[in-house]
Image: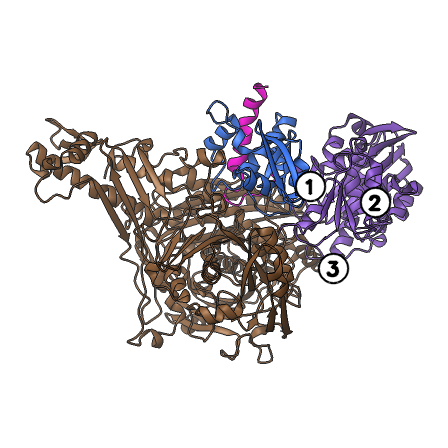
Chain colours: A purple, B brown, C blue
Amino acid sequence: MKPPKFEYHAPTTLDEAIAALGRYGGDAKVLAGGQSLMPLLNFRLARPAALVDLNRIASLAYIREQDGQVRFGAMTRQRTIEFSPVVAQRLPLLKEATRWVGHLPIRTRGTIGGSIAHADPSAEYPAVLAALEGEVVARGATGDRVIRAADLFQTYLTTNLAPDEILTEVRLPAMPAGAGYALEEFARRHGDFAIVGIAAVVVREGQRCTMARLATAGAGPVPVRLRAAEEILEREGLGDAAIAAAARRATELVDPDADIHASADYRRHLAGVLTKRALTRAIGVARG
Amino acid sequence: MSETRWIGKSVKRVEDARLLTGRGTYIDDHPPVANACHAAIVRSPLPHAVIRGYDLSAALALDGVVGAITGEDVARHTKPFSVGVTAPIHYYCAATDRVRFVGEPVVVVVAKNRYVAEDAAELVQVDYDPLPVVLDPERALDSTAPVLHQAVGSNLAGHRRLVYGEPERAFREADVVLSERFSFPKYGSTPIETYGVIARWDPLDGVCTVWSNFMGPFIMHPLTARVLGLAENKLRFIVPTDIGGSFGIKSSIYPYIALMALAAMRLGVPVKWIEDRREHLLASSSGTDRVAYREVAACRDGTILGMRFKWLDNVGGYIRSPEPGCSFRPTGNFVGPYRFQHLEVDASVVMTNKSLTGPNRGYACGHLYFETEGMMDRLADRLGLDPVEVRRKNLVQPDQFPYRTPTGGLYDSGDYPAVFDKALELARYDELRREQAKARAGGRYFGIGLALAVDPSVSNMGYVATALDPQFRAKPEYLPKSGAVDAATIKIDPLGRVIAILGTTPQGQGHQTVVSQIVADELGLAPQDVTVVDEMDTFTRVWSISSGTYSSRFGSVGTSAVALAARKLKAKLVDYGAHLMELPVASLEFRDGAVRPRSGKGPSYSIKDLAGRAHWNTESLPEGMEPALQATAVFGFTVAKAVDAEDRVNSSNTYGFIAEVMAVEVDPETAAIKILRYVTVHDAGTIINPMIAEGQIYGGALHGLGGALYEELAYDEHGQFLTGTFMDYLVPTASEAPPIDIAHIVSPSPLTPLGSKGLGESSSMTVPAVIANAVSDALAPLGIWINELPMTPSKLWTAMDRARRAGAPTVRTGVSEPLASFSGHPRPKPASRTPLP
Amino acid sequence: MVTVRLNVNGVAHEGRCEPRKLLVDFIREDLGLTGTHVGCEHGICGACTIMFNGEAARSCIMLAVQADGAELATVEGLMRDGKLHPLQEAFREHHGLQCGFCTPGMLMTALDFLRTNPAPSDREIREGISAVLCRCTGYQGIVNAVRAAAPILASGR
């Protein structure tokens, strides 16, 4: 299990990286934290002509607040996010989700940009991006473009990033103060990708729900926003009956596949169970 | 018997300092030979195909490639391995004319490093003609199934019907007869260190030296020599001091030893191969997947009269020795801890297009007890008895030891009721039942499982012949087999310190520590005065066919050899002391590290005194005494006898006992299983180092839990392998490991000098049973019996969902029947059970 | 071929290798530090875990060239003044190892875990060391060792 041969570039600026990527016309791969790409190389399931390693581009690692958003440089490590006070304050859902990402030595290397660009539908960060209606910035030879979460994920491990584009920034709107949140995940072992995960955010005014967000991990080829289930809560409030109705609706909104870990029916069922649990916990911590 | 200042103590391990500091010597660490080239193996991508030809040109043209060998070389220059059955199955160290499972070795490429070897392996072209595939052992016996080995004519590698006592009568006379179908998954050992082999051929002296992390049994050494066409004293096996875990699987490395030896011989360079994880999961070894049909015949009071086992053991594409141990390894303890005398075993060993099988921690006992203990609970349920009661009624009693089982086992010692009681007491069984009643009233799925097991250690290699017909064994040319032997050498240096030399192959069991404790006690020294050398080398160590560190044998056979070697030396020291003191031997004894008058009066000679004199002044030795102070002892169990004409065999030499209680709760929504309490009580005779013993229990239990809940080597319906990564083959992590309450009862073995038995496999053989029973009990309100592993949440939820949709259960059904269809077969539940005759 | 200059356990090293060479192979083969082990080569088992610029990382899913200019620590560098590190001592005391193959990765992971969580609960210890697979111990001895080492390490800084 040794990687095949490839050319290797470790630019120190983004422009150099984009130029390097451009030279290979789609045959190069961007190496971020490497926690997914390197195993694929070792299994020889990926065989790019070249790797463009972003790890030496210092300007791609940052967390800053701007325009009501928290903006992450693509190379911000998951572990940095886990311990970031800004994230704890503005994006507690992301902090909670980070603890579900792999294991400690994975998170020291793994990056937010890499996790999202890899687009594993079982992963936590894509679900959070979907739930929070975040966006990413992609830079190519012709400049930057901003891609909304809903447009980014195409199918399994596939985004609409062009081969010569690099995801440079992830933007997540700061969660409203007092918003309730939870990420409920069911996996066979600690640290595994989710069989199903549900990210939930609720903003309440008494028993009224002014905003509900629900997004899935592991319940289809891309993270799914459960808009119709959210609407039930926004319409009917946060009582048990509404939660139950939203959970039921969630099972109808997902179209999961079967694999060796779980049947499609079980995943669909879990989407409902975890929606209920995530909402119950989110409502429990919501203020307002 | 000397005083035991060290035996029984949790002495810290001498192995740890080097292993904690990165100075272990594992196979991949220190190249024992200069300029070794690296091998990569081209493996079959197809589960079943004819090999039409090879094209190596691109691979051989690659810079850095030394050469390659193919199945043609294998067919021309090696012989097939001997197999444990009489069917004409030609099992070579790589595929020759046909591939029979995904991952089967086809070509070996050797290059200057592993990177280039893998590059070259990708360039090898093999032309295949695909053949139809069969994976399920029952399907494989259909007349329409594709046949893997034309010469055999079917996929049945072997079949035995073993009859002990009068099972027909037992079933005729029974008040109640129950039957059930079980299926047990294919799972492996997955030590964190994979296989590794380094082979060097010296054409001038005709010696092939192979370093590997082979764990024994060394019966595989003569088998491999024969395959390579070498005299046994021209094939040298060396095993490094440190092996990174095995749990049975590294017994099955020997075909790779032959393959790499052949590569070294053909290509004229030393060849090193370190298996990667994908190869390990794909094609190293595993336990069998088994379909079992069980029947039990019992009286209405719960007394078991007899049982019937019908097994289909899936050994994969070939049968590799020591298979069919999957069926016969536990022959002597087929009846477990129960007294019934009538048993019929119908064992079919079946070949399919899956990877090959072999020993995996608890060799075949996980299967055995999953079925037997499952039947005990079904019997209790049927009779309206507590599962404790139905077990107690049938246990072998303390006054029956040594107990001869109907299948030939000789249980050496034990007090099964005491161990069972201890487990129930520790688990607070009655309290658990009360909690359960409360939980059930609240709609929760709370269950309590029990499992009892006779823990067989130190296999008598004679068991393998149970696979052969008695008529075959009766032929004059047949050589009977038996034995369980290990050796140790102890040397005392001129300052009275000791070097002990073993030929064992420990994989983490702490042999150096344990031996230092034993020798320290025997010779009145401190453990740090004893240096233990443990690096197996077939050219320099004393060994025999059954040597090796497998089948939990060190705890009784290896330790016995050490104790006996020390005692030989002590006797010599007493003789020498008597000569120096001019006193009769009978008036002296060896005590507290010195030869002393038994009277306690008069001078004594310390071991240091005696050693100095004996080494520096041989004139001081009595006439006829051999100079130097060293002794080798070879310990062999005399109870290890060949299988008899009635298929009875004492398949192990020491037999411990395990009693377990587990409480679980099943999440009604997700079907996740939570372990609330887990108690395991062991009787492994004298325990030399409790810390090490408990470490074995913890590890064994988690391995069993892996098989019960997480681990399965899975294939799709086309025979493609689905679990080639650690993302898909789920080894439990610390988060999945339950806390365990462990206790011991000690019934010393009368057969070993120290009274010890093995316990390395321990709870790996009971956990599948105890957790399946606990989950069955939890799901009793839904009418579900667990009869298939692993219990994945998805599978379990499907069964629960179906049961809930069907409404209140009128019958309790299995999770599956037939395989994976989850339909279940009717079983009367207590409330509506059919009247007893 | 690329040149890799790095510092391992306080010692400067330089080597040349192909860009595709895995960091763990470089550490073992080029630097001769065989204490770091290879268990799965896909970043799951954790046997190859080292400290990379002060943080635990899997060296089987990093390239050697990525370590150019980095500070690494491996199991060989844990001893101080000829004595076992307190965490190593705790593993010995609590039977936190059997075959020893996962141990180097387990030690490095536990060290980084305790750095950010100096007083963990058992549950947290189990989650923390879930990053490394062990087949021998059932993890109990390791949990005990990490729990015992935590206050010693915490008081030492």
Number of the label disc, if any, that sits on residue B343: none
Chain for disc number 2: A
Side (left or right) of A254 relative to B720: right
Residue A84 occupies quadrant = top right
Q: Residue at (46%, 73%) from the top-left corner?
A: B159
Provide the residue designation for mark 3: B805
- Helix, strand, or loop for circle 2? strand
Query: How crowded is the residue under tag 3: few (<14 C-alpha within 10 Å), some, or many (20+)?
Result: few
Which residue type does callout 2 highlight?
Ala
Residue C26 occupies quadrant = top right
Between the C-alphas of marks 1 and 2, the distance is 19 Å
Q: Residue at (29%, 55%) from the top-left corner?
A: B637
Lower position in the chain sequence, tag 1 or tag 2: 1
Number of the label disc, if any, that sits on residue A215: 2
- Helix, strand, or loop for circle 3? helix
Q: Which tag is nearer the camera, tag 2 or tag 3?
A: 2
Percent position (x, y) of residue B573?
17, 37
Chain for disc number 1: A
Query: How crowded is the residue under tag 2: few (<14 C-alpha within 10 Å), some, or many (20+)?
Result: many
Chain for disc number 3: B
- Regarding residue B20, the answer to whether it shows in the image is yes
Q: Which residues are magenta?
A: C130-157
Side (left or right) of B646 relative to A250: left
- Helix, strand, or loop for circle 1? loop
Percent position (x, y) of residue A158?
82, 51
**Does the magenta portion include C149?**
yes
